[in-house]
Image (cartoon, rainbow, N blue to C red):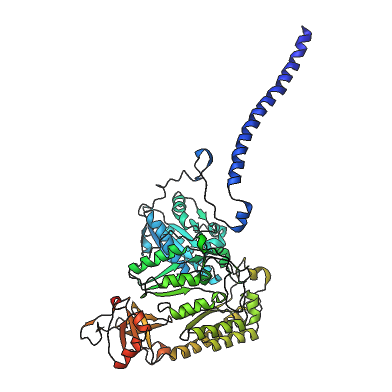
């Protein structure tokens, strides 16, 4: 008996060893089933090569019908704005203006209301710029003002929420959220679809942010909503991001890689704007003329992207896709009486086919923005611009040969890393030799994350930068006065924008070359040699004979009303000789 008692522990131990093995086999069998499902999913899903190529992969449903929404506790009902009022402030470039319209379109669909009165706002959203330190400091100062206003808000009202959108949100991220708790919501340029959810979280008293950059987001299915729908000019975004990686520029780090919007959605938006009576559309992109739509298989050929002669890129030449010239041609054919502009381009993306298209299509404005940044080949190399001073000059000569009446504008940076007095003088000589009518000039401001921040020295003193900037501005104004002065006595086609800010007795508008003009508010004949007259309205095209004093914005005009087609084929010049004043409508085309 004692012997068998001593065997019980041994028997128990044997059972212990057997049972775990049995349980382990069950578990192993179960794991094997899951492994089979996992391996099946992997074999049918994207590969590592797809990841490297940036291939878009459709989302697959979760296994066993599970919901993939990690925020299911925030239902769509909670995302609704419930008539809360939103106030937008937009800073920086035209892309931010378009981003404001996109963000507003998204919030409007969720039941938010927009207000132009800051005191009424429940939500204040600042669409920001990070291109220079001064631009960011402006936002910091504004946040201090808004925070003070927020604290003074009556307790009986809903607490005001403050949000930062755009490039500054992407660049500074954590610093914005932590710095004195000035901000409730942070949304990068690719996260505007998430705004309703972020605002819902903020309403609960927590800070909310989404600054993830995307390889695909173009907001192609979001129709921007203009705050002033009666306007006769509109922006249409065609691509986002930039691959050029200029050494001074923060844009690739705040806007991400280049990706182009499908041509079909762009054409749809332009048609809609035409139906609304819009008379001028500006195509937008950080590097707008590098547009390359690869959304459809028929566009994906093997042809290499053609660059301007003498220009190169920091990346491998891209293949296939529907190019900028194709898009520009299709857009211009939608409405012959609608002006087409585009900004901001890179000089490397002006092959002859683009230039000939601008010269031939009557409604594509013969005005080209051609950012030079510097007149020194040494500085251009340090900037990683991909061209020399000589290549830039060759491009200018080619443009003026193909488009004789072209108007050129440009960007320049004074005091970049390593810039000497000789480099500065070369920039001044470039400005004199090219002859721009509009310019955007700034002193260099180093940005973190950029190539210059990591590899170069910001060694030009601030006072020297400012002095050189002032010299550039002075020379630019002198040359612009000469360019504009050459227009005295000519007849220009002007799109009327509305009443002049100078006087209620005057109207203002812009020429094909994007020059602002002011002229008397007078009734004109509605038909050639007709005694019936009609007032001039915003959205009309006006033939303006340029008088003396152009350089000083003191204009004296005799003017006509007409259309793009009539002006371009030379009827305007013939009618000018007979001194008739007349108007024509779109039906006269």
Q: Is residue 321 left or right of residue 80?
A: right
Q: Residue 374's x, y, as percent?
A: 59, 80
Q: Residue 547's x, y, as percent?
A: 37, 91
Q: Within the image, what quadrant is residue 371 found in?
A: bottom right
Q: Is residue 454 above or below residue 578?
A: above
Q: Within the image, what quadrant is residue 38 found in?
A: top right
The residue lying toward the viewer, choosing from 281 and 482, is 281
Q: Is residue 37 visible in this depiction of the protein?
A: yes
Q: Residue 225's x, y, as percent?
A: 38, 63
Q: Is residue 55 left or right of residue 540?
A: right
Q: Is residue 126 left or right of residue 22?
A: left
The N terminus - image quarter: top right
Q: Is residue 149 visible in this depiction of the protein?
A: no
Q: Is residue 263 above or below residue 56?
A: below
Residue plotted at (51% across, 76% down) = 353
Q: Is residue 143 left or right of residue 8?
A: left
Q: Is residue 360 above or below residue 49?
A: below
What is the residue that sits farthest to the left in this orientation?
531
Residue plotted at (63% across, 70% down) = 314
């Amino acid at each position: 008996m004692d012997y068998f008692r001593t065997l019980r522990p041994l028997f128990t131990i044997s059972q212990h060893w057997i049972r775990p093995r049995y349980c382990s086999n069950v578990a192993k069998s179960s794991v094997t089933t899951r492994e089979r499902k996992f391996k099946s999913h992997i074999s049918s899903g994207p590969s590592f090569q797809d990841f490297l190529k940036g291939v878009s992969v459709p989302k697959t449903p979760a296994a066993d019908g599970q919901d993939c929404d990690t925020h299911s506790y925030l239902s769509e009902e909670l995302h609704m704005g419930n008539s809360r009022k939103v106030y937008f402030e937009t800073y920086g470039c035209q892309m931010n203006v378009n981003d404001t319209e996109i963000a507003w379109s998204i919030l409007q669909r969720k039941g938010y209301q927009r207000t132009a009165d800051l005191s009424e706002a429940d939500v204040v959203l600042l669409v920001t710029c990070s291109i220079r330190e001064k631009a960011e400091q402006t936002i910091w100062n504004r946040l201090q003002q808004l925070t003070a206003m927020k604290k003074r808000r009556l307790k009986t009202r809903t607490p005001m929420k403050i949000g930062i959108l755009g490039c500054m949100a992407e660049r500074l991220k954590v610093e914005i959220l932590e710095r004195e708790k000035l901000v409730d919501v942070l949304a990068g340029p690719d996260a505007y679809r998430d705004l309703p959810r972020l605002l819902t979280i903020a309403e609960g008293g927590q800070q909310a942010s989404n600054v993830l950059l995307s390889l695909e987001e173009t907001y192609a299915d979001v129709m921007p909503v203009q705050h002033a729908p009666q306007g006769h000019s509109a922006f249409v975004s065609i691509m986002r991001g930039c691959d050029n990686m200029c050494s001074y520029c923060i844009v690739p780090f705040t806007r991400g890689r280049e990706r182009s919007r499908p041509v079909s959605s762009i054409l749809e938006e332009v048609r809609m704007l035409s139906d609304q009576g819009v008379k001028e559309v500006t195509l937008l992109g950080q590097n707008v003329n590098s547009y390359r739509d690869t959304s459809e298989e028929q566009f994906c050929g093997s042809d290499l992207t053609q660059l301007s002669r003498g220009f190169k890129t920091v990346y491998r030449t891209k293949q296939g896709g529907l190019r900028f010239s194709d898009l520009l041609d299709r857009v211009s054919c939608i409405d012959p009486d609608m002006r087409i502009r585009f900004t901001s381009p890179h000089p490397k993306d002006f092959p002859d086919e683009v230039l000939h298209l601008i010269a031939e299509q009557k409604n594509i404005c013969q005005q080209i923005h051609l950012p030079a940044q510097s007149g020194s080949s040494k500085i251009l190399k340090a900037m990683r611009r991909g061209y020399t001073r000589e290549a830039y000059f060759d491009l200018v000569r080619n443009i003026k040969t193909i488009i004789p009446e072209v108007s050129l504008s440009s960007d320049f940076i004074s005091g970049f890393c390593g810039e000497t007095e000789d480099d500065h003088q070369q920039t001044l000589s470039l400005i004199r030799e090219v002859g721009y009518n509009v310019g955007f000039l700034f002193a260099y401001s180093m940005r973190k994350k950029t190539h210059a921040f990591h590899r170069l020295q910001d060694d030009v003193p601030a006072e020297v930068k400012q002095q050189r900037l002032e010299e550039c501005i002075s020379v630019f104004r002198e040359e612009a006065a000469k360019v504009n002065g050459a227009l005295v006595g000519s007849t220009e086609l002007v799109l009327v924008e509305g009443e002049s800010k100078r006087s209620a007795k005057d109207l203002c508008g812009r020429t094909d070359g994007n020059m602002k003009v002011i002229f008397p508010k007078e009734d004109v004949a509605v038909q050639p040699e007709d005694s019936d007259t009609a007032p001039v309205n915003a959205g009309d095209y006006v033939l303006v004979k340029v008088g003396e004093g152009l350089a000083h914005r003191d204009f004296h005009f005799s003017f006509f009303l007409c259309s793009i087609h009539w002006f371009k084929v030379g009827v305007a010049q013939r009618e000018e000789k007979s001194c008739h004043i007349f108007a024509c409508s779109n039906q006269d085309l």
